[in-house]
Amino acid sequence: MLELSDVSKSFAGTTALHSTDLAIRPGATTVLIGPSGCGKSTLLRLMICLIQPDTGSVLFEGSPLASSDVIELRHRMGYVIQDGGLFPHLTARGNVCLLARHLRWESRRLDNRLDELAELTHFPVDGLDRFPAQLSGGQKQRVSLINSRPQLLSFLDDEIIDALAYHLRGPGDRPVCGQRRRYRRQHAATQ
């Protein structure tokens, strides 16, 4: 479980996040909703320890996060930033496969998973060989979604749905949510 207890954050004297408590249980889907500037992105960055809170604490499985826990937490969770965060010199395939290759995934496993995730996110297979500058905004967001974690364990997405094509919103989100539910059920013993 990931828990934030009385966390707050300010930047240059401006409060970005007022005192907040939040607990996210394994397998839960949690949505942060609010207007621009209310602290959603700050809260997400606190959750994965990209920044430290001014007050309060971030707990992972009941204990304050230590540096070794941060690495484990990041391996179990994906984080998709609002603007995509793709390497411009790599194709979509290169961006998506970078971490999996680093983790020494076998080519067949990687290709199968890439095909599955491209289908899941309605990403055109021929788009995998394009560079980010050649992709639409929605396609960049889909690549970022695929790239967030090769195993789809968890998502922390920062307004990713905003940039997805309309047909993927609302009822179109259900295939992604359904796939996540199926994946969680199939892998519940490993979480």
Image (cartoon, grey):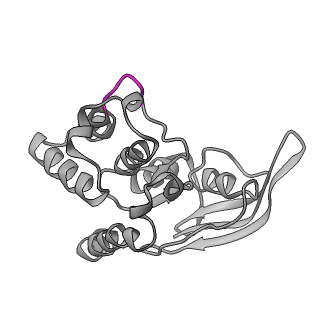
182 relative to 55 in the view: left or right = left
Quadrant (top left, top right, bottom left, bottom right) of the C terminus: bottom left
Q: Determine which quarter of the picture holds residue 152.
A: bottom left
On the image, the x and y values in percent for residue 10 come to: 82, 48
Indicate whether 172 appears above or below 79.
below
Question: Residue extending furthest left?
Answer: 108
Q: Majority secondary structure of the magenta segment?
A: loop
On the image, the x and y values in percent for residue 24 come to: 55, 72
Indicate whether 165 appears above or below 99.
below
Task: State the residue at coordinates (29%, 56%).
Answer: 122
Indicate whether 157 appears above or below 32.
above
Task: State the residue at coordinates (56%, 54%).
Answer: 158
On the image, the x and y values in percent for residue 3 come to: 61, 68
Indicate whether 165 appears above or below 95.
below
Task: State the residue at coordinates (51%, 56%).
Answer: 157
In the image, residue 78 lies in the stretch drawn in magenta: no
Question: Residue extending furthest front?
Answer: 166
Between residues 132 and 107, which one lies in front from this camera angle?
132
Between residues 168 and 52, which one lies in front from this camera angle?
168
Between residues 133 and 87, which one lies in front from this camera angle?
133
On the image, the x and y values in percent for residue 124 come to: 25, 47
Q: Determine which quarter of the picture holds residue 4.
A: bottom right
Q: Determine which quarter of the picture holds residue 171.
A: bottom left
Question: Residue extending furthest top?
Answer: 89
In the image, residue 88 lies in the stretch drawn in magenta: yes
Task: State the residue at coordinates (54%, 56%).
Answer: 162
Question: Residue extending furthest right?
Answer: 13
51 relative to 108 in the view: left or right = right
Between residues 25 and 124, which one lies in front from this camera angle?
124
Magenta region, residue range: 87-91
Give the tally of numbered discs: 0
125 relative to 173 in the view: left or right = left
